[in-house]
Image (tube, rainbow, N blue to C red):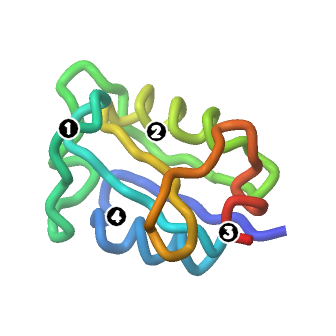
Amino acid sequence: MAEFKLDGRMTVKGLKENFKKCFGASLRVYTTPACKTFADDKATLASIRQADAKGGSLTVGGNLKVGNFEKKIGELYGIGVQVSDPSDKKLVDNDLTLAAAGK
């Protein structure tokens, strides 16, 4: 089962690339939980983290549901993420697992 670890030192670009490599799905990263403005690919997760977010590291497995993953990232970093299909054309259902989202 694919899994990856992320922490505040990871860049947005690195997060998206690792996510795609592990799960096959695309990841959209935003500067706020409201998912209005895309985050800069060169920024680190720590640099875009909201002041009241705790930060830290997280290990993510393929059996985690999309909705739970998006919620955990929001709680940890105070940023928004959305999982989309492999071609990044549409968002996937929150009830799918991360592994299923890339198929």
Question: In the depicted view, which residue is nearer to us: 88 or 77?
Answer: 88
Amino acid found under the numbered disc labelled 1: Lys
Q: Which of marks 4 and 3 is nearer the N terminus?
A: 4
Residue tagged 3: 102
**From the viewer's perspective, is residue 54 above or below residue 49?**
above
Residue 68 at what x, y percent from top left?
Answer: 63, 33
Residue tagged 2: 73
Amino acid found under the numbered disc labelled 2: Ile
Amino acid found under the numbered disc labelled 3: Gly
CA–CA distance between discs 3 and 1?
24 Å
Residue tagged 1: 36
Residue neighbourhood size for the residue with mark 4, other residues' Cα within 10 Å, grouped as few (<14), some (14–19), many (≥20): some
Q: Which quadrant: the N terminus?
A: bottom right
Mark 4 or 1, which is nearer the eye? 1
Please report the residue visible at 49 percent of the width from the left and 76 percent of the height from the top: 87
Q: Earlier in the sequence, mark 3 or mark 1?
A: 1
For the residue labelled by badge 4, is the local secondary structure a helix, a strand or a loop? loop
Residue 14 at what x, y percent from top left?
Answer: 36, 73
CA–CA distance between discs 3 and 2?
19 Å
Please report the residue visible at 50 percent of the width from the left and 74 percent of the height from the top: 18
Mark 2 or 1, which is nearer the eye? 1
Residue 45 at what x, y percent from top left?
Answer: 28, 52
Contact, mark 3 vs mark 2 (Cβ under 8 Å): no
Please report the residue visible at 49 percent of the width from the left and 67 percent of the height from the top: 26
Q: Which of marks 2 and 1 is nearer the N terminus?
A: 1
Residue tagged 4: 10
Mark 3 or 2, which is nearer the eye? 3
Please report the residue visible at 42 percent of the width from the left and 54 percent of the height from the top: 7
**From the viewer's perspective, is residue 86 above or below residue 44?**
below
For the residue labelled by badge 3, is the local secondary structure a helix, a strand or a loop? loop
CA–CA distance between discs 2 and 4?
13 Å
Q: Which of marks 3 and 2 is nearer the N terminus?
A: 2
